[in-house]
Image (cartoon, helix red, strand yellow):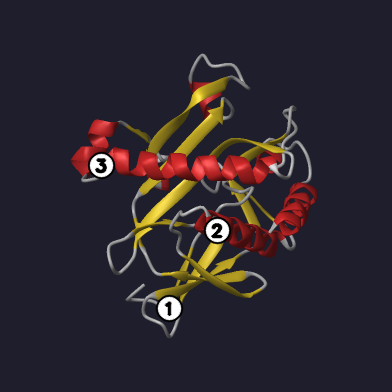
Amino acid sequence: MSDTTFIVGKVKTVFATSEPDEVLIQYEDRVTAGNGEKELWVEDKGPMCCEISKIIFKKLEEAGIKTHYVSMPTYRAMCCKKVDIVPLEVIVRNLAAGSIVRQTTFDEGRLFYKPLVEFHLKDDSKNDPLLTPDRMRLMGYEPDNFIENALAINTALIKIFHQIDLDLVDFKVEFGHDSNGTLLLADEISPDSCRLWKTGTRESYDKDLFRDEKGDIVTAYKYILQELRRIA
């Protein structure tokens, strides 16, 4: 952030602010899949994901999980602590779906009694390859630190989504270090980064509706936002 006033991502734009330790993250009306190979502009998708993330970040903070969230000053942007993002995508799986079904012998819907935590290099040009714990250590990252945080987030998210009749199938999170070196949950928590099924079914309420052309994400995202507002 030191050399520019903004950074443009696939679905969010990060702006510098007058506070050196804070940034403004604007959520755009864009949905992507396949590392940006498939995309669509969807009206009001950005504000919905922004408010969903805000509510979830606040609930995670109440559960003792440290996040980068500070406030939501506008309807489509949140103020966050400035962090140096760790180049890892951490995926937690409670049920088998998506890539793990395509790449293994697991049947869709298989329950993992012990949630599975995966690590991927955050690099679209390399197609976000799966990392082994030994590779992570050679990169300078201790897997156990991220596993502990990811599982705590998973426990809290399962409880949150259970209250709105959704099963948390899996989700992706990112972490970053603030100016004090504290590891914080960063990026977003929304139906863009979670796989959610209607409780007891495999009816999607997430980006799979767009990814697999199974339905309208707006209706699903509106339902999630409405129900999260109810329990906020």
Q: Is residue 203 above or below residue 88?
A: above
| Disc 1: which residue | 5
Q: What element carries label 1?
A: loop
- Residue 29 visible in the picture: no
Which numbered dot is residue 121? none
Residue labelled with disc 2: 57
Residue 150 point in image, percent of width and height: 43, 42
Residue sitting at x 45%, y 81%: 17
The answer to which of marks 2 and 1 sits earlier in the sequence is 1
Q: Name the residue under label 3.
A: 142
Give x and y (percent) for residue 125: 39, 46
Q: Nearer the viewer, mark 2 or mark 1?
A: 2
Work out how far the residue at label 3 is from the one at label 1, CA to CA, in angstroms: 32 Å
In the picture, measured across the screen, residue 6 lies left or right of residue 109, that is left
Q: In this view, does 226 lie to the left or right of 66?
A: right
Q: Quadrant of the C terminus?
A: bottom right
Is 50 displayed left or right of 216 in the figure? Answer: left
| Gap in angstroms between the C-alphas marked 2 and 3 | 24 Å
- Which is nearer the eye, 41 or 166? 166
Pick whichever, 66 or 109, lies toward us.
66
Q: Do we see residue 50 in this rendering?
A: yes
Disc 2 from disc 1: Cα separation: 25 Å
Disc 3 element: loop
Q: Which residue is drawn at 26% across and 39% down?
A: 136
Q: What type is the residue that disc 1 sits on?
A: Thr
